[in-house]
């Protein structure tokens, strides 16, 4: 499986093309819409979420509720494009119209300046429209399809928030995935601890009032992934490395860890590694899960636990200093619509990019042209691993 996305933040639409989804997978438009709607929620979102109502149009690859095995094309229309037709349209326009929204002041923390240098754009809008986090809607759509495939194979994925602005929300590690999902989805900031949630919302309100932004830590939890997915034989076959790359590709994410992650640097080996146990009912399993479901680049069969660090959004209402690329004079950076905190929404994005990497690993490991055949292969493999 692989996918490509296309589209600009204020363009006509976002498009996702997914290749490699098995045929005969039951797939409904509503399953994708559910994920897109979740991405738009969360405390701290800006006015853009009130303008756009993200719903998917399935253009190809699905017929009568089942995938065909051919490329799936998903479209999310930008309702706000009607206000941006002159600015973002493909047809040539008069010079005086073009100058209305030309951006020559690159914003610190964004792709504006570097992208302008790379692609030769004197109008930073040509960069910021594509580098915008609006593109993550297209990736959530791809991940939603992946989640449907995984669920049909008995693999469930949940994303939630563990920290915002240094306020940590603890989670009872004995909670099942469904319990984690239910509790976090009931929270405005998608977390567990009610006291921490209140403090997080207060911090978001304060940041908004001050024209600032705050970041945090998201976590994705996966149950049902069989042992042995990924490989140790080459660096680019390690599944945890592939997941780390996908998480780092999300806008504003600056760090990834599995299990206890960086905490492992502060512990002895006996407090880090997971002892191996065996039972007739479960087969091999780990006494603990400090390594987050991975050893040697491969899944262990334990729940996958991966965290991602999101920096504060760099678009601020008390803008940072920048330099106009035409006059070379110092200015305050330009302002686009922004969220004071997008961590709750980012947990949904992270959930879906992780889901896609897991689905991709499954379809690479097993025969994946025809879904019933894939399911039989995965079921047989589970039995083989348990009897090892």
Image (spheres, rainbow, N blue to C red):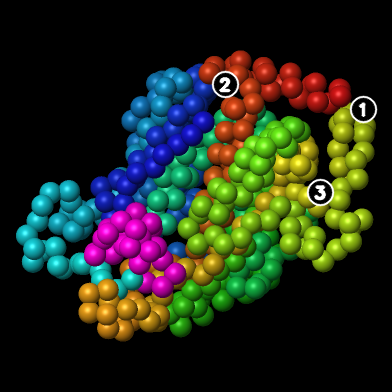
* Between marks 1 and 2 in the image, the one whose residue lies nearer the viewer: 2
Q: Nearer the viewer, residue 169 or 330?
A: 330
- Asked if the residue under mark 2 is in contact with the one under mark 3, i.e. CB atoms within 8 Å, the reply is no
Residue at coordinates 74% horizontally, 18% vertically from top-left?
380
Q: For numbered disc 2, what is the local secondary structure?
A: loop
32 left or right, relative to 360: left
Magenta run includes residue 109: yes
Disc 1 designates what residue? Answer: 280
Disc 3 designates what residue? Answer: 289
31 left or right, relative to 192: left
Q: What range of the chain is rendered magenta?
A: 107-132
Residue 236 image offset from top left, x and y in percent = 62, 40
Disc 2 designates what residue? Answer: 368
* Between marks 1 and 3 in the image, the one whose residue lies nearer the viewer: 3
Residue 62 image offset from top left, x and y in percent = 41, 24
- Name the image quarter holding residue 177: top right
- For residue 268, the mark is none
- Whole-angstrom CA distance, mark 1 to mark 3, is 20 Å
Magenta run includes residue 346: no
243 left or right, relative to 7: right
Q: Residues within 10 Å of mark 3 (few under 14, many from 20)?
A: many
Give whichever of discs 3 and 2 has the lower sequence position: 3
Give whichever of discs 1 and 3 has the lower sequence position: 1
Residue 334 image offset from top left, x and y in percent = 31, 74
């Amino acid at each position: 499986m692989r996918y490509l996305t296309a589209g600009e933040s204020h363009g006509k639409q976002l498009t996702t093309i997914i290749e490699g989804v098995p045929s005969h997978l039951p797939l409904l438009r509503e399953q994708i819409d559910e994920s897109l709607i979740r991405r738009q929620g969360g405390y701290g979102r800006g006015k853009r979420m009130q303008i756009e109502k993200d719903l998917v149009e399935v253009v190809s690859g699905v017929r009568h509720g089942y995938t065909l095995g051919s490329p799936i094309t998903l479209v999310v229309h930008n309702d706000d494009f009607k206000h941006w037709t002159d600015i973002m349209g493909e047809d040539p326009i008069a010079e005086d119209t073009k100058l209305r929204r030309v951006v020559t002041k690159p914003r610190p923390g964004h792709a504006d300046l570097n992208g302008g240098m790379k692609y030769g754009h004197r109008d930073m809008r040509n960069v910021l429209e594509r580098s915008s986090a609006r593109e993550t809607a297209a990736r959530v759509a791809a991940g939603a399809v992946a989640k449907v495939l995984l669920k049909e194979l008995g693999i469930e994925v949940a994303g939630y928030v563990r920290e915002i602005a240094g306020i940590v929300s603890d989670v009872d590690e004995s909670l099942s995935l469904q319990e984690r999902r239910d509790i976090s989805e009931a929270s405005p900031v998608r977390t567990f601890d009610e006291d921490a949630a209140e403090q997080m919302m207060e911090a978001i309100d304060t940041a908004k009032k001050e024209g600032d932004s705050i970041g945090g830590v998201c976590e994705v939890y996966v149950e049902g992934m069989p042992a042995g997915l990924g490989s140790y034989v080459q660096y680019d076959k390690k599944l945890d490395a592939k997941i780390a790359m996908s998480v780092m590709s999300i806008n504003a994410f600056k760090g990834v860890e599995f299990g206890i992650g960086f905490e492992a640097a502060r512990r002895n080996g006996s407090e880090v590694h997971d002892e191996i146990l065996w039972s007739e009912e479960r087969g091999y399993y780990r006494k603990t899960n400090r390594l987050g479901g991975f050893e040697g680049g491969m899944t262990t069969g334990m729940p996958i636990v991966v965290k991602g660090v999101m920096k504060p959004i760099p678009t601020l209402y008390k803008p940072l200093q920048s330099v106009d690329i035409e006059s070379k004079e110092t200015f305050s950076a330009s302002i686009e619509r922004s969220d004071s905190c997008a961590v709750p929404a980012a947990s949904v994005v992270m959930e879906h990019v992780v889901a896609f990497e897991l689905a991709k690993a499954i379809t690479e490991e097993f025969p994946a042209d025809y879904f019933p055949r894939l399911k039989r292969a995965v079921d047989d493999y589970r039995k083989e691993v348990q009897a090892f």
